Image (tube, rainbow, N blue to C red):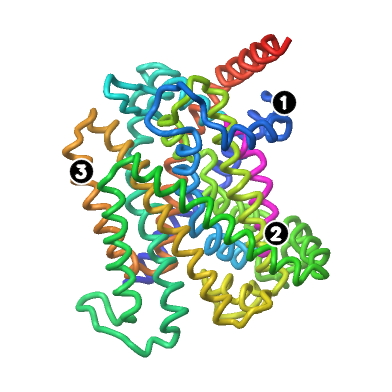
Amino acid sequence: MWEAINNCLQTIDDLVWGVPLMVLIIAGGILLTVRLGLLQIRRLPLALKWMVKNEEDGEGEVTSFGALCTALSATIGTGNIVGVATAVCAGGPGALFWMIVAAFFGMATKYSEGLLAVKYRVVDKDNHTLGGPFYYIEQGMGQKWKWMAKVFAFFGVCVGLFGIGTFSQVNGISSAVQNFFDPNEVHTVEIPGLGTYSWTVVIASLILAFCVALVLIGGIKRIANVSQIVVPFMAILYVGFCLILILCNITKIPDAVVTIVKGAFNPQAVTGGVVGSMLVAMQKGVARGIFSNEAGLGSAPIAAAAAKTKEPVRQGLVSMTGTFIDTIVICTMTGLAIVMTGAWQVEGLEGVEVTTYAFQNGLPFQSQVSAFVLMICLVFFAFTTILGWDYYSERCLEYLTNGNMKKVKIYRWIYIFAVFIGPYMTVSAVWTIADIFNGLMALPNMIALFALSGVVVKETKDFFAQKKHKMN
């Protein structure tokens, strides 16, 4: 039965993540990059400066940095550790190249999303903020497109509940915890109707669901407060260990880079025919890149809309740094570690096991220490992603139900239950379901970005013209 379900899901996934959607996402990023004059290069230093410098008197619920950390909490997750490994194993090392290319153009996309989110957001008398693709579709494109805004919001709820937000993150946590504490499944328990599982998985799911519930009950401000502490800590910790691994294997970098570039255009030459075409490498790289940094997906602008800011352009630049940090820095380091150590070529390894192998064989520590470090990073990454995606999907549901907070609170408990059952979903099914909902969510958002690209360009030109005038 599971095989039939997996085959059905894979067919749907191949249809959703076919050439048309990949072309749409990349073309959108290229269009915005050209129309904005390579803004992601020219304005990156300013964006990084504003990333940590909050505005004094803007409307919104959380600080600009808090909004970014909420967005990063959702984007820096298992996609950076497990997703990169899955992409490289399925699409060859060349998938990493396409992931970086997609992220470069995705920075322009993420900038545009953040700008539009603040421009078209709604702030009520209680300072409660609601914004994102559903509002810039409805208000920017017009009321006749409200049906598309609702389609986006519906898929946003589904992505949170069945995709990025719950199953894939919890599955990554449980796999990492089991691989470290009980790799041979010595201590197991029979769960009726589900099968036999390690006690570590059961205990981890209980603790995780409890911790998630504690934070989610506090709403956006508690999520932002937790994210502002955990996100910088976990990102610095992970990047630090990746740098140690790369420096300890620095002589392998030239060969790894050649392998990645060659694998992007001629996968068969690198994989020995395992990956048949450049299209497969591109598809896996772009799909996992979107899963990781969410540029074009329309999720990050929901958090951006809550920022205390008066300037849409400023928040757009801050939002843009999320893609840079997530994919161009963190995912690249993970991919390099996997290619340099040859972890992607080891048969029988799946998901987090690939990255664990890379850490154990690339770091100058005992294998248990390396595995423990990766487990801690993965647990933190996935935990904050669960929090961030609950916020996104709750805001989508709030829009769908016209602000019915009773339904939102019921959904919150369903979400917590989904976190609890996440470890008992199969790895292949989990990632496939996540991919499908990602693609469906991206479609209406990308249509809106094409339609409103002129608004983005005008806002950007006006802002920097005023800024230049003030300096003079």
Q: Nearer the viewer, mark 1 or mark 2?
A: 1
Mark 3 or mark 2: which is in front?
A: 3
Above or below residue 461? Residue 438 is below
Q: Which of the two labelled residues, at mark 1 and mark 3, occupies the earlier sequence position?
A: 1
Kindly identify the residue that appears in the image at 27 percent across and 54 percent down: 214
Where does residue 416 sit, x and y in percent of width and height?
Answer: 26, 55
Please check the rendered image and state whether residue 67 is part of the magenta-colored stretch, yes or no: no
**Element at label 1:** loop
Cα distance in 3D space between marks 1 and 2: 28 Å
Residue 259: tell me if it is visible.
yes
Disc 3 residue crowd, few under 14, some 14–19, many 20+, Cα 10 Å? some
Image vertical order of residue 129 relative to residue 77, above or below: above
The amino acid beneath tag 1 is: Gly
The mark found on residue 94 in the picture is 2
Camera-side residue of 387 and 106 = 387
> Which is the main secondary structure of the residues drawn in magenta?
helix
Residue extending farthest front:
56
Q: Is residue 181 left or right of residue 19?
A: left
**Which residue corresponds to mark 3?**
409
| CA gap, disc 1 and disc 3 | 44 Å
Which residue range is magenta in the image?
92-111
The quadrant the C terminus occupies is top right
Q: Identify the residue at horizontal 44%, vertical 64% (top origin).
A: 379
Instruction: Classify 10 Å Cα crowding around label 2: few (below 14), some (14-19), many (20 and above).
Output: many
Across and down, in percent, residue 469 comes to 69, 9
**Which-is-in-front pick, marks 1 and 3?**
3
Residue to which mark 1 is pinned: 37
